[in-house]
Each structure stands twice: as C-alpha cells, then as structure tokens.
C-alpha cells in the first residue's frame, strides 16, 4: 500500500517529527496598473515541519492536509529519501502471501483484534468433519492485506472475487506442515490442534452472546420472475452463521458459500451478499507462482439483481445480510435488513437515485438538469455523486482535468493525495491550477474521464463551456456525466441514434463495448420490471380526464385557495409541503408513501419530477393542489414505503396510480435579495434609489445617465417623483434587461401623458446597448451619473477602467457609485442557510470569501472602496464623499451598501468640452422616447 510523505516521515521519526499548521490570510491584488487595492482572499494554510536536525516550511494550500504533505515531501527531498512506494514483485508478494496465511493459523492469531478471529473461533464450534474448518471465502474477504498481495500477483484479482480464493488455496498447499487443504474444497484447517487453554480463553470471550439471534435478511432469487423477499436467519450461540445462510440457500454448509469481497451500502456496515460457490472449482495446485486464469463451472443462471447490486457477476440465488465479526465487537455483529433497505440500495446505484435519497424525497425529487450556484443547490453535489457512483459500480475514481482559455500555459501543480482524486493534466498539457489548487485563469473548463478498474475507458466528457471558478466547472462537468448516465438507467433500451444525440448534446464520448459490458445486467432487470409495471398502471380511460394535462402525465388536477398574486419563476426557490399516496382502482383507502412538511427546490432546473414543477408554476403562494399521475418504476415506490412488503402486495392486487397533495408555502428571491430583505425594510434596493433621488433633487439636474441600468429599476422609480430631469438615459450590455426596461419605462411615460395624471418634465428617454468601460460622446457632460451595485459584477481592473473613463471622458458633474460592503456580509449571512461542505477546511475557506451574489467578481471592504474612490477623484479633479444605506456609518461594520458621491471641481465650461477625437458613437440605441409619446425600439 502506498504511503504518503507524511506517513513516511512519521514512520521514520515518530514523535520527533513536529507538524505545525498556521492559517495564512491570502491577499489578492486587483491587477489594475498603478492601483494596488488589497482584496481579502481565501483562507490558506502553511505547515512547518520540525525534525531533529532541520526544519522545512511548505507552500500555502487550501487544505491543512495538503500543507502537511508538502512539508513532508520537502523534508524527504532534503533527506534524500524517495517517497515512491517500494512495490514488491509478484514473486515477493507470493512469498508474503504464504507467510500471511501461515500466521492466520498461529496460536497468537486467536488473541488478535482481526475480524477473522471470530470466524476461526466459530469454526471451533462446528460439528463433525466441519470442526475447525474455516471457509476460504471469509479469509479472502476479511483480510485486506491478503487481497492486496493477490492484486500484486495478478491485477485481474480486482475484477474477480474468485481469483483471491485461488491464490489463498494455493498458498495453503505450500504450508502442508501447518495447514490442511482438500482437493475441490474451499476451506482450510489447522493441522495440529490448538492448545486447550487457548481454545478455552478464546471461546469464553464470546460466551456472553444470547442463546440464539433472529436476523432479518433479504433473499434475492436468480430468476427475475420471482420476487425479492425477506427471510429470517436463526443463528444459535454455538453455531456458525455461515452454515445458517448455507442452509437457506439449499447448501449443506458454509464452506460452500462465497461472500462478496466488499460491503454493500455504507462502508462501515457488514452488509454483504452471500451466494453458492460453483460446484466445480478446478485448482491447479502444482505451480509455485499462480498466474493462470481461474477455471470455474457455475451451476445455475446469472443473478442480474444481485450482480447489479454487487458490481460483479453472481450466479444462483443470493442472500443479502448484515452480519459478521468486527474489530469493535467481541460477539457477532448484526443488523436487520428490510425490503425498503434493499430497494433503497438498488436505486442508490443510479445517479437520480443518489440525488433522491440525499433529498429524502424519492417520489418527488429528480436529478437537476443544471448546476446554477452552490447556494441554490440542494442535496449531494454532482462531483460527490459521481465519485459515489464510480465506487458503487467498481469503477476507478473519476479523473478531472482543468484548463483555461488563456493562451499562456501555466505550470502543473501537485494536488497532494486528495481523497477524491487529484486533478489530472489535460491532454493538451495545460493544467491551470496554482500551488494552492485555485484556478490560474478567470475562465476554466473541466474534462472528466471514467475508467474501469482495469483502466479501460468507459466515458469521457469534454464540455465546451468555460466558468469563472474551477469548482463550478468541475460540478457542471460532473452533472453532465451524471445526466447522461441517468438517461441510460431510465431506459437501457434507448435507441442508438437517440443515445448518440444525447452524447453530442452533453459533450460525452462513450466507449460502447466497455460501457455495455459493465452495465448489461441492468438491462435485464429493467425490461422485466417495465413489463410487470405495465400490467399495474391505471389505463387512461379509467382516470378522470377532466382538468388533465395529459402531455405531462397529470390527471384529476384541482387547485384551491385564493390567488395571492405571488407566483414562482425560474431561478427562485420554491418551498412546498406535500404528500404522495398510492391509489388503488376500486378502493377508497389510500396508502401514504411519502410526505414532507417543507421541501425547497430551484425552479427551472428540473430538481423535481416534471409533474410537480408544472403544477407548481400554476400556483400562487398559499394555494394547494391535488393531482394524479401514473406509477414510476416499482423500486422507487418500494424504496419510499415504510412497509414495502404490504405495498408490494397492493401493487400486485390491481391497477394503481399516485396521488399528490401540494401546498406552495412561499417563494424566495435570488440569494442576494433574500439576504437583504431579511434585515432591511424598505429593501436595500429601494433605499439606494431613494438616496440617488435625494441628490438628483438637491442638484436640480436636468440630465441623468444610469451606467449599468439593468432592467431600469432606477429610471422607472425616478418617474414616480417630481424632479427637474428632462432627459434620462440608461446603458447596459444585456439586451434582455434593456428590453424589460423599455417596456416598463414606456408604459409609465405613456401614462404620464394622460391629463388626469400629474405630468413629468422628462422630454427624452434613451436606452443604449454598450459597455460602460467604452466611451460614447453622446453621454458626455451629463448633470448626474449613477452606477448602483454594478462595479462588483465586473473584474476589479474593469471597475478601475470604468472609474477612469467615466471621470475623464464622460465627465458628469456628479457621479454616484454604490457597491456592497464586504464587511457587512457576516451579518447578512447569519440569516441565510449554511452551505453544505464535506471538508471542514473547505467550509471555513468558503465562508470566509462568500459573496452576496454568485455573479459578483469582488466585494470591497470600506478601506478598499475608499482607496479606489479617493485615488480616482484625485486623478481626475473631483471631490468625493462617502456614505451608504442599510445599517449605520457610526457603528461597525458600517453601511450594508457603501456609496461614493463624486463632484467635479472643474468649471462647467471645461466639463462641456470634448477632447479631440472623442466624438465616436460606440453605443447602439435600443429604445428611445420623446415628449410627444413617440418611441422607437430596435429590439
């Protein structure tokens, strides 16, 4: 097993190796020439390693463990020690395997803490010819050291649970003086009896067990025509549980039973599959170094359900049981397994099932189609789910490669022994991560590769999209892979043409031969299940078709309650309460399957089944609805039901459907608005408008330009108050936002022309499509300019560029700029939900630089904002004063939204003069209006 640099150092120096990790606050420069504004960066860690003769210090990293490994690697380099593992040859591994098997039958082993010890003691309680006989299958499963040695002898052991048995049995034949084997038998005996005192002391340690234990397990027939059903294992205190399982599978004893080499479900559990060994298992015991393939003659048919659950082929019936000996317990460890547990494990093998279980909403949640923000995402994150999927299906961990759209290559970094697999260099050789693991470029994209354990390619995903953050690119690429896999698991018989179209849409390259070889068993299961479920669905003509939306599979729809006027929209978070019941044709009784008092999801991302999202979009807050839909796959229903056995019988009794009851509790705005509205009344957005309006009135301005006007909220609000404004102008780069602004402003200005409404003095309104960092002479010399909550959506160097251009070229008499106060975020975020993170170090780092909106490129402290504004004002002959809204400037941490008001010191006649060559028109007129009510739009 490979040792990390830290493990090697600790192994060599022990307590004399002192690791000290210090937190380092990174300082990020804004990149603006001539202006260095410190920006609070992520929390990083640096490690100092003190050894007896010298000390070393690591670079900075986002995780403590990476800093420690870096320091250890530097120390090893100084000591001249190669950290590469000394991997034994196949011959050396064979010798070690023989020695390890010999140790198992020593006197000392019976007093060890190994889980195998319990099996050896239980073997001493067996009767007759089985006395002292230890099944080779439990030796192969419970001793990971033996399994690892077998992998060194033959890497194909990874994909065959029987090859390990071959090597253990052959190793035992080399120990004829200590161990007894029998041709064709998968069991081992100690040749000489154990001393009586050792047997007595070992058995006494387990004598506190009850007389008998009843353990609930699951019987999985090999025939798909037969149902999976619960069985009870009655294990006596003087018996061996493997013999009980053998009799349940119609075998004479536990020596004829094979055990899955890994646990099913949680890694900490003892849940394994037990199945009959092949009747004929031919072993060539003559060669010194076994390197031939196993020769197996299985009787019975392939068990598709057990094979799919385990990830390798299993023949004949199988028992799923949580039972065994552990390091932590003297006696037999056991847990009951219900049908619900089995079906939950089954759906956990699909990407959608993993997500459904993480949301605890099996019949309602669905794997989202898009990853928008970490704040809005609920449930397990895509990368986490992809790693889980690969582990469950015996695939290698996914390999991620990131690269940027920068022409400049950056050096590859070491991602120290990260448990979730290091980022691998892209095929182009451009690995764009820096020493702390952060992206070296602003725009990053990520590729994902999936391999089998034998390194055969299964899938590749090469998205074309670039993202600002490395984490976003990884999550989005992971979601694409999961979405493609999910489409296959929903319909394994999907036509090749349709599958190819899906591959192209998701930027996936599939290796069909390797992929279908790996997942072929699921196709058999799916086809049988679909046929059985088709017999149980209510026919459309037997369902009330009134108030139906048949194209979405919705029937008997009814919505009740007063219309509150608050409807969910794409991007918002909807909160619902719901219940799902099983309805049986001809029965008045309903069986509750699933319910939640509060469940939230992001609209427009497919985070719930289509029927729930379609119905929710038609509801306003406070309304309730009821509708019916056809049955989903049977395993989802049985995984959701508490009494799966009863629900299974009901499903078999007649045609059924599901009935949903939903109440829309509330709808939230996007994260930034949600946080601000929780603390401020009126909202900060309104307070900013009121602040700007006050200065507009005081200045008697007649012309105004709003830089970054968005959907026109400021311009719209100005029309509600009497001012001296005659011309208002908005500039933005989003035509979609400008379109909304044009509709809103046109509607309001048209109403102002009505004699019954007080008239406005505005004679002209224009909306331009253009960047605020580019000068357009038509906007030169306005009385007042506003830029409210805009600069944080730019890069910092663009914000400085905007400041220079607006004060040197546009030259308004007054400029009002507002931006979030980063220091206030701690207060705002106390009222928002915490973000799920796996690693505590990552959580600390995330919270320390969490911005109010995912689209913010930076957020400045008061000192940073003051520095930026003061230097700009001095450079362009403006004065500047600072204020804000939300909170108080006299108390920490100041205003929630900080504001700078620039005033020109130059005479008006100088401001009115355009510089030579500055008369270019770079903006496109999107919409304009004159005082006669005439408007023109180019949209």
Image (cartoon, rainbow, N blue to C red):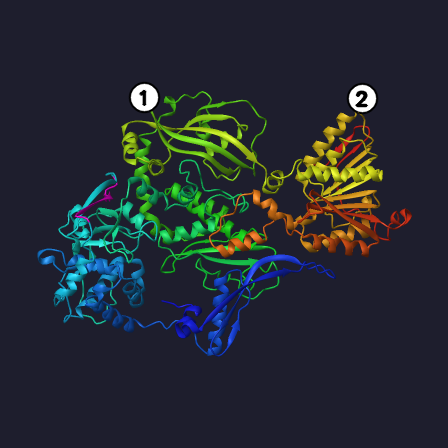
Q: Is residue 813 above or below residue 584?
A: below
Left or right: residue 305 compared with residue 928: left
The numbered dot on residue 755 is 2
- Measuring from the top left, give residue 19's x and y in whole percent: 48, 68
The numbered dot on residue 300 is none
- Does the segment drawn in magenta span residue 219? yes
Q: Residue at x 52, y 22 (%)?
A: 561
**Residue nearest the observer in this picture, 173 or 917:** 173
Q: Residues within 10 Å of mark 2 (few under 14, many from 20)?
A: few
Classified by dominant secondary structure, the portion drawn in magenta counts as strand
Which corner quadrant of the image does residue 88 belong to? bottom left
Q: Is residue 608 above or below residue 748?
A: below
Which element is circle 1 on? loop
Q: Is residue 500 in sight in this rendering?
A: no
- Measuring from the top left, give residue 740's x and y in whole percent: 68, 35
Residue range of the region highlighted in magenta in the rendering: 210-224
Q: Is residue 795 above or below residue 150?
A: above
Q: Residue at x 30, y 32 (%)?
A: 647
Which corner quadrant of the image does residue 1 belong to? bottom left
Residue lying furthest front: 891
Left or right: residue 923 compared with residue 850: right
Identify the mark nearer the N-term, 1 or 2: 1
Q: Which residue is mark 1?
A: 586
- Does the segment drawn in magenta span residue 570? no
């Amino acid at each position: 097993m490979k040792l990390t640099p830290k493990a090697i150092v600790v192994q060599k120096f022990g307590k004399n190796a002192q690791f000290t990790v210090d937190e380092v606050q990174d300082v990020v420069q804004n990149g603006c020439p001539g202006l260095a504004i410190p920006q609070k960066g992520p929390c990083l860690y640096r490690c100092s390693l003190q050894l007896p003769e010298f000390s070393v210090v690591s670079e900075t990293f986002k995780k403590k463990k990476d800093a420690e490994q870096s320091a250890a690697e530097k120390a090893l380099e100084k000591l001249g020690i190669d950290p590469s593992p000394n991997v034994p040859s196949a011959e050396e591994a064979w010798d070690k395997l023989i020695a390890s098997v010999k140790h198992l039958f020593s006197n000392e082993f019976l007093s060890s803490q190994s889980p195998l010890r319990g099996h050896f003691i239980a073997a001493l309680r067996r009767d007759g010819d089985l006395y002292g006989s230890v099944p080779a299958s439990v030796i192969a499963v419970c001793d990971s050291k033996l399994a690892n040695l077998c992998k060194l002898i033959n890497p194909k052991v990874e994909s065959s649970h029987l090859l390990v048995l071959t090597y253990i049995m052959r190793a035992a034949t080399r120990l004829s003086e200590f161990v007894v084997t029998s041709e064709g038998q998968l069991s081992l005996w100690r040749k000489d009896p154990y001393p009586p005192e050792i047997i007595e002391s070992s058995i006494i340690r387990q004598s506190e067990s009850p007389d008998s234990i009843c353990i609930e397990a699951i019987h999985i027939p090999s025939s798909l025509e037969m149902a999976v059903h619960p069985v009870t294992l009655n294990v006596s205190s003087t018996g061996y549980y493997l013999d009980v399982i053998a009799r349940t599978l119609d075998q004479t004893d536990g020596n004829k039973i094979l055990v899955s080499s890994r646990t099913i479900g949680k890694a900490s559990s003892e849940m394994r599959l037990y199945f009959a060994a092949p009747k004929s298992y031919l072993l060539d015991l003559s060669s010194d170094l076994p390197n031939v393939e196993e020769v197996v003659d299985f009787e019975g048919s392939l068990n598709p359900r057990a094979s799919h659950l385990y990830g390798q082929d299993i023949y004949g019936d199988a028992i799923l049981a949580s039972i065994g000996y552990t390091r932590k317990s003297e006696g037999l460890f056991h847990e009951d397994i219900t049908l619900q547990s089995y079906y939950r494990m089954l759906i956990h093998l699909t990407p959608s099932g993993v997500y459904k279980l993480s949301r605890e909403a099996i019949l309602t949640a669905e794997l989202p189609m898009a990853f928008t923000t970490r704040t809005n995402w609920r449930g397990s994150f895509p990368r986490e789910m992809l790693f889980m999927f690969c582990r469950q299906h015996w695939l290698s961990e996914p390999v991620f490669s990131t690269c940027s759209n920068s022409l400049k290559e950056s050096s590859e970094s070491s991602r120290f022994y990260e448990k979730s697999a290091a980022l691998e260099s892209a095929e182009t050789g451009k690995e764009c991560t820096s020493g702390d693991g952060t992206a070296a470029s602003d725009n990053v994209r990520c590729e994902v590769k999936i391999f089998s354990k034998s390194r055969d390619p299964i899938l590749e995903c090469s998205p074309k999209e670039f993202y600002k953050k490395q984490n976003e690119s990884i999550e989005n690429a992971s979601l694409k892979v999961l979405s493609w896999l999910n489409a296959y698991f929903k319909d394994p018989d999907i036509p090749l043409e349709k599958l190819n179209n899906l591959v192209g849409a998701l930027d996936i390259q599939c290796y069909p031969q390797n992929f279908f070889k790996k997942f072929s068993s699921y196709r058999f299961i799916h086809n049988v299940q679909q046929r059985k479920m088709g017999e149980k669905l209510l026919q459309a003509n037997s369902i009330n078709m009134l108030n139906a939306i048949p194209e979405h599979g919705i029937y008997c729809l009814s919505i009740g309650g007063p219309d509150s006027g608050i409807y969910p929209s794409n991007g918002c978070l909807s909160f619902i309460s719901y219940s799902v019941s099983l309805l049986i044709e001809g029965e008045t009784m309903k069986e509750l399957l699933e319910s939640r008092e509060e469940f939230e999801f992001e609209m427009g991302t497919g985070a719930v089944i289509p029927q729930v999202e379609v119905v929710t979009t038609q509801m306003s807050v406070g309304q309730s609805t009821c509708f019916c839909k056809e049955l989903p796959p049977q395993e989802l229903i049985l995984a959701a039901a508490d009494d799966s056995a009863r629900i299974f019988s009901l499903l078999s009794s007649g045609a059924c459907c599901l009935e949903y009851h939903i109440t829309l509790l509330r709808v939230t705005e996007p994260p930034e608005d949600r946080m601000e509205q929780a603390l401020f009344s009126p909202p900060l957005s309104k307070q900013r408008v009121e602040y700007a309006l006050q200065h507009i009135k005081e200045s008697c301005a007649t012309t105004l330009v709003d830089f970054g006007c968005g959907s026109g909220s400021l311009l719209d609000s100005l029309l509600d108050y009497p001012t001296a404004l005659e011309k208002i102008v908005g500039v933005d780069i989003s035509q979609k936002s400008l379109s909304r602004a044009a509709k809103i402003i046109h509607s309001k200005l048209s109403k102002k022309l009505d004699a019954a409404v007080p008239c406005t003095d505005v004679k002209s309104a224009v909306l331009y499509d253009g960047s605020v960092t580019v000068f357009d002479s038509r906007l030169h010399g306005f009385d007042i300019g506003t830029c409210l909550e805009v600069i944080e959506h730019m890069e910092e160097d663009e914000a400085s560029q905007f400041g220079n251009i607006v004060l040197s070229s546009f030259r308004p008499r007054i400029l009002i700029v507002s931006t979030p106060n980063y220091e206030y975020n701690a207060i705002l975020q106390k009222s928002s939900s915490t973000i799920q993170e796996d690693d505590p170090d990552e959580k600390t780092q995330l919270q320390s630089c969490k911005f109010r909106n995912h689209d913010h490129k930076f957020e400045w402290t008061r000192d940073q904002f003051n520095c930026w504004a003061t230097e700009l004002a001095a450079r362009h002959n403006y004065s500047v004063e600072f204020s804000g809204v939300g909170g108080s400037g006299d108390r920490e941490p100041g205003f929630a939204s900080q504001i700078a008001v620039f005033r020109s010191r130059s005479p008006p006649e100088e401001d009115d003069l355009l510089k030579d060559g500055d008369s270019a028109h770079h903006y496109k007129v999107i919409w304009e209006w004159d005082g006669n009510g005439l408007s023109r739009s180019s949209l």
